[in-house]
Image (cartoon, rainbow, N blue to C red):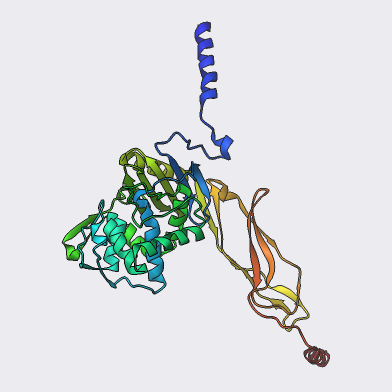
Amino acid sequence: MKRFCCIFLCAVMLSCVLLPVSAADTGGVPAFGDNIDAKSAVLMEASTGEILYEKNPDEALPPASVTKVMTMLLVLEAIDGGKIKLDDTVTVSDYASTMGGSQVYLKAGETMTVSDLLKSVIVASANDAAVALAEFVAGSEEAFVAMMNSRASELGMMNTTFKNTNGLDDEDTGHLTSARDIALMSREVLKHDLVFDYTTIWMDTIRGGAFGLTNTNRLVRFYRGCNGLKTGSTSKAGFCISATAERDGMQLICVIMGSTTKDARNSLAASLLDWGFANYARVSVPGGDTDPIPVCGGVKDCVAAEYPDFSVLLTRGAEKNIETVPELPSSVSAPVKQGDILGHIVYKSGDTVLGTVDVTAKEDVAHIGFFVLFLRMLDAFAIG
């Protein structure tokens, strides 16, 4: 019996040594781990851009059709900027009709609306539709690719070089990006509400119902809260995805690159999203008005003041302990202009400052002149 107890105690002690990092060791969040079926991965919270998980986030890798996230972005920006419209008619070029891989089998000279081409790109990952849209926006695929690289630079995508609009990599083109860079451009796409009209489609049609489309992103149907975004796979890239999902007001972006199978990629994306939703929360505190702040030497005795909404990403449970601490002056001196910063609201959790917002004047308060002051003194004397 003593021998059995000794062996048991040794086993318990050994298991403690071999256990993965605990919640206490990672600020209250259990580690997800790097032993995953992917060359690289990133989990980002969209509103803040904060990275919650990463594995080789800056390694430049072939992205396959996840490339089309940038194609989508530039098309959406052209639409929102008034350069093109959803109901514009696009005539398919000879070149666009020759694209292989995923396609909707566009014919040279065929016409299709921008909306149906965008649907084909986002839902069915159509390479031919991506080129047709690129030519319509920029005049040629080459010009559009230059726009892609310029936009990537603006977004801080430091490890990205685009060579085409669709991610085809049959030749060694040097068409590369990273998980972090994909998350950055995905975050930018999500700022365009129009994208969700397409990324949330499970099945639809084009050509008046004659050609069916099924979303390549199976998570749209099978993962709660999934609202996008783009899958991709080639023999060089492996299986990739930028998967986006929203729950309880928090939007997450999960990027997987270089997974070995479609199922492994989807399962990993779902698990990583689950981990993010289980361990983090986006907390929004509404703004409002402060008490009026006294004004010295103004035509009014007080000035109305306000502060904006505040949003912060916290570990689960910490959102229950947010304290609001006003830092306001006892008075301000005239003149005061609308929008002037008068003080701050500080948000804290214990001794930790989560962030601050400015308290600003809602109105102008002019400096009181001698004549107005004299009239006030006369009124006061008369009343007295």
Q: Give coordinates of residue 380: x percent, y percent.
A: 81, 89
Q: Is residue 324 left or right of residue 179?
A: right
The foreground one among 139 and 244 is 139
Residue 301 drawn above or below residue 8: below
Q: Is residue 240 left or right of residue 379?
A: left
Report the residue that reaches farthest toward the front: 172
**Residue 227 seen anywhere in this rendered image of the structure:** no
Q: Give coordinates of residue 280: x percent, y percent.
A: 50, 47
The foreground one among 366 and 123 is 123
The foreground one among 141 and 201 is 141
Q: Give coordinates of residue 24: x percent, y percent.
A: 58, 35
Residue at 63% x, 75% y: name it. Answer: 362
Q: Is residue 26 left or right of residue 239?
A: right
- Total labels: the figure holds 0
Residue 149 drawn above or below residue 304: above
Residue at 47% x, 61% y: name it. Answer: 150
The image quarter in which residue 140 lies: bottom left
Report the residue that reaches farthest toward the left: 210
**Residue 264 seen anywhere in this rendered image of the structure:** yes
Residue at 19% x, 62% y: name it. Answer: 107
Q: Give coordinates of residue 252: x percent, y percent.
A: 45, 51
Residue 70 drawn above or below residue 54: below
- Can you say which quadrant of the picture contains the C terminus? bottom right
Residue at 48% x, 37% y: name it. Answer: 32
